[in-house]
């Protein structure tokens, strides 16, 4: 773990590389004595950026997770450094968090970008808060970035930052990366503030998406809304010419001449995110994790088949789909409750948002009903945990599982699928994976399923369990080879190289 220090805040003009994300990579913890501690939060983005953050004048700008009402208390003040890079806190009040984060980000953009699995809410108040908070982020960034610095803005919470920042600091090289899907035009165009969002993103020099579909959808939207010329699949990477509208009455929803933009080319491309493969392989191979995996199986009654689901508790993840498929397979006598266990681990997430509370209730009801209806006394084929796990513990669960079930209804990438593959150091194990996760494009050797079809999921589970060990090994080996060559360090390097190339 990195050392968090309290050294003074970075002086302006010192930061040549700036990461801007909704959250700082730290969490506050209060111990039994009531003392406050700040700890590095183990997130994918932190490990992805660690190699590029260390050894340079780097700053991470984001919210600490503690509302301004609380951080007025000195102990809660955000530390100024973590390891070798600086932290800049964007202070947010509790009501701002409610409106900008729980409101516009997670009750409007999140469901809209994930195929309207639940209906997005459109409220002017939350939109106004989103604009205000994005401006705070842009201003803090403008204050600390060195002349001509590289700035990397992350995700759907901050889509307006690139253009706001460009207006404040035209000297900066600005990259934007969207971690979630960018939806097809027919969905995106529902958004009352669609034009503002697109203009916001176009402030960047490079816009990165998880998949070519995202890049293509974005080009389509800019063409329909603004009439900009673009090519999402050019050999040198996609591009959009901002400020040179090619108006076409047939495909334009609304013609807006590009008054506010200087003509320039924005690069648009797919950069599928990945994981730290080597460190996960090492963890999985450690005797402690191997032993823990055996203990987990023993604690679960040494089943012949252990199936596993691991997700943030989110309606996009299709948790119910796999639970229902499993229950039906037991009911149909396709699986034997004496020898099969499905363990679902769900991390608490966005618990303040109503849809998430409802989802948790639904899933717990389903698990409870299944417990009562399935198996003999003493047999509990469906197990459920609602908690976040330390990294090594999570790795042990991956190592223990025979088949991993990853069935999101829509997912930008899905790192769980990649994590599972990385831990299968003996090439054993099977992955059942939704076609609608970005990861499906890279892992075609998984058993791909349509999560909207229960039959498709049931069939894939049975095939994954019933196939020969050789078939499983061949598939897993191919997926591991791909991942080893496409780890998270490569993801960050390729994005930053492409960003640097836009400035040349
Ligand atoms: P998420 O929607 O959070 O990320 P995902 O990619 O699956 O989804 O990442 C979840 C992370 O949380 C994984 O690293 C996993 O290990 C961890 N996790 C899940 N359950 C856990 C538990 N019980 N205990 C501990 N850790 C747990 C968003 C997008 C994704 C995209 C990522 C990265 O929605 O599509 O892949 O960003 O860009």
Image: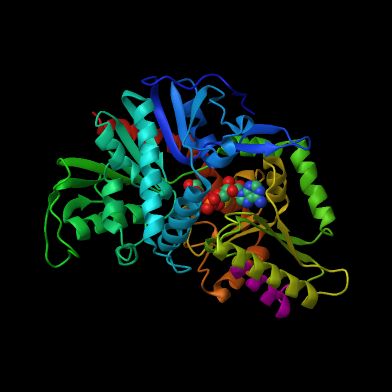
The quarter of the picture where residue 423 lies is top right
Q: Residue at x 72, y 69 (%)?
A: 367
Q: Nearer the viewer, residue 102 or 17?
A: 102
The residue sitting at the bottom extreme is 332
Dominant SS in magenta: helix
The quarter of the picture where residue 500 lies is top left
Q: Is residue 440 left or right of residue 497?
A: right
Q: Is residue 19 left or right of residue 347?
A: left
> Against 89, is 207 above or below?
below
Q: Residue at x 81, y 58 (%)?
A: 300
Q: Is residue 118 magenta?
A: no
Residue 338 position, x and y percent, is 82, 69
Residue 461 position, x and y percent, is 63, 67
Which contiguous range is marked in magenta? 320-335
Q: Nearer the viewer, residue 347 or 5?
A: 5
> Against 64, is 113 above or below?
below
For the N terminus, give its image quadrant: top right
Q: Is residue 61 left or right of residue 367?
A: left
């Amino acid at each position: 773990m990195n050392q968090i220090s309290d050294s003074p805040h970075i002086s302006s003009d010192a930061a040549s590389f700036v990461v801007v994300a909704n959250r700082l990579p730290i969490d506050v913890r209060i111990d039994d004595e009531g003392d406050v501690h700040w700890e590095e939060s183990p997130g994918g983005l932190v490990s992805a950026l660690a190699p590029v953050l260390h050894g340079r004048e780097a700053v991470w700008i984001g919210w600490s997770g503690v509302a301004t009402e609380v951080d007025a208390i000195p102990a809660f003040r955000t530390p100024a450094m973590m390891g070798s890079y600086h932290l800049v806190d964007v202070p947010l009040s509790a009501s701002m968090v409610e409106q900008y984060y729980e409101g516009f980000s997670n009750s409007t953009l999140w469901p809209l970008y994930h195929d309207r699995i639940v209906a997005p809410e459109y409220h002017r108040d939350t939109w106004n808060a989103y604009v205000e908070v994005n401006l705070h982020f842009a201003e803090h960034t403008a204050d600390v970035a060195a002349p001509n610095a590289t700035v990397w803005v992350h995700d759907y919470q901050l889509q307006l930052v690139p253009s706001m920042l460009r207006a404040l600091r035209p000297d900066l090289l600005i990259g934007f990366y969207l971690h979630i899907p960018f939806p097809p035009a027919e969905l995106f165009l529902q958004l009352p503030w669609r034009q503002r969002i697109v203009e916001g993103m176009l402030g960047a020099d490079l816009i990165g998406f998880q998949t070519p579909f995202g890049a293509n959808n974005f080009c389509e939207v800019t063409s329909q809304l603004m009439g900009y010329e673009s090519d999402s699949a050019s050999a040198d990477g996609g591009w959009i010419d901002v400020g040179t509208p090619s108006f076409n009455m047939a495909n334009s929803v609304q013609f807006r001449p590009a008054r506010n933009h200087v003509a320039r080319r924005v690069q648009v491309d797919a950069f599928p995110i990945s994981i730290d493969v080597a460190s996960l392989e090492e963890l999985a191979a450690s005797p402690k994790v191997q032993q823990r995996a055996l203990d987990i199986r023993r604690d679960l009654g040494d089943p012949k088949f252990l199936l596993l689901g691991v997700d943030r508790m989110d309606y996009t993840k299709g948790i119910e789909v796999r639970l229902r498929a499993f229950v039906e397979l037991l009911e149909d006598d396709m699986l034997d409750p004496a020898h099969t266990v499905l363990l679902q681990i769900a991390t608490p997430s966005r618990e303040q948002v109503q849809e998430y509370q409802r989802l948790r209730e639904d899933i717990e009801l389903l698990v409870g009903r299944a417990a009562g209806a399935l198996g003999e006394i003493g047999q509990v084929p469906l197990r459920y945990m609602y908690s976040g796990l330390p990294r090594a513990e999570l790795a042990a669960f991956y190592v223990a599982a025979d088949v991993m079930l990853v069935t999101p209804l829509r997912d930008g990438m899905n790192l769980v699928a990649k994590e599972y593959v990385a831990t299968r150091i003996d090439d054993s194990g099977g992955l059942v994976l939704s076609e609608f996760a970005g990861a499906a494009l890279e892992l075609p050797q998984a058993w791909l399923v349509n999560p909207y079809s229960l039959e498709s999921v049931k069939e894939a589970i049975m095939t994954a369990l019933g196939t020969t060990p050789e078939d499983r090994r061949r598939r897993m080996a191919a997926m591991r080879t791909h991942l080893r060559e496409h780890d998270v360090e490569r993801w960050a390097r390729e994005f930053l190289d492409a960003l640097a190339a836009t400035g040349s």
